[in-house]
Image: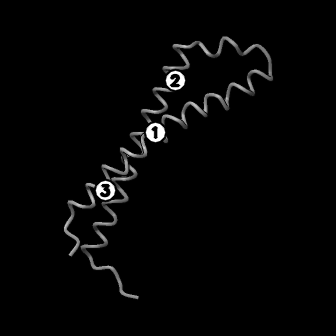
Amino acid sequence: MTQLTQLELSNWLALYLATGLCCAIACTLAVATTAAEIYRDRSWAAVKSLRSAVLFLPKAWWRWQKLYLGSMPVTLGIVGLFAVSMNWS
């Protein structure tokens, strides 16, 4: 098995860093949007018992998941275009 050259190693590290940065931005935006939607809908007003409180958490989690996973094509596009723009040889 051949070892990575210094250029390839730095490119892979840059790709991982770019992916992590894009995912952190997407996560932050998804949290902010979910919080705004919950505030706008006043979803917490329906929480009147322990059962409704327990059911509120998965609903909020599902809202966040839909927003966060919806950013996946954009993240793949950005990181893919970044990888193509690099000099690999």
Q: Quadrant of the N terminus?
A: bottom left
Amino acid type at mark 1:
Gly
Name above or below for residue 10 compared with residue 53: below
Residue drawn at (35%, 56%) of the image? 17
Q: How many numbered marks, from 0 up?
A: 3
**Could you tell me how far apart the alpha carbons at marks 1 and 2 are, in whole angstroms?**
17 Å
User: Element under label 3?
Assistant: helix
Residue drawn at (61%, 33%) of the image? 61
Name above or below for residue 40 compared with residue 88: above
Which residue lies under the disc numbered 3? 80
Name above or below for residue 15 compared with residue 74: below
Q: Earlier in the sequence, mark 1 or mark 2?
A: 2
Q: Quadrant of the C terminus?
A: bottom left
Determine whether, in the image, residue 47 is placed left or right of residue 87: right
Q: Which mark is residue 70?
A: 1
Closer-to-camera residue (83/10): 83
**Crowding near pointer 2: few (<14 within 10 Å), some, many (20+)?**
some
Name above or below for residue 69 compared with residue 14: above
**Could you tell me how far apart the alpha carbons at marks 1 and 3 are, in whole angstroms?**
17 Å
Q: Earlier in the sequence, mark 1 or mark 3?
A: 1
Of marks 1 and 2, the one in the foreground: 1
* Callouts 2 and 3 close, C-beta under 8 Å: no
Q: Position of residue 11 (x, y in %)?
A: 28, 66
User: Element under label 1?
Assistant: helix
Q: Position of residue 44 (x, y in %)?
A: 64, 16
**Crowding near pointer 1: few (<14 within 10 Å), some, many (20+)?**
few
Quadrant position of residue 87: bottom left
Which residue lies under the disc numbered 2? 35
Q: Earlier in the sequence, mark 2 or mark 3?
A: 2
Amino acid type at mark 3:
Gly
Residue drawn at (26%, 54%) of the image? 81
**Could you tell me how far apart the alpha carbons at marks 2 and 3 are, in whole angstroms?**
30 Å
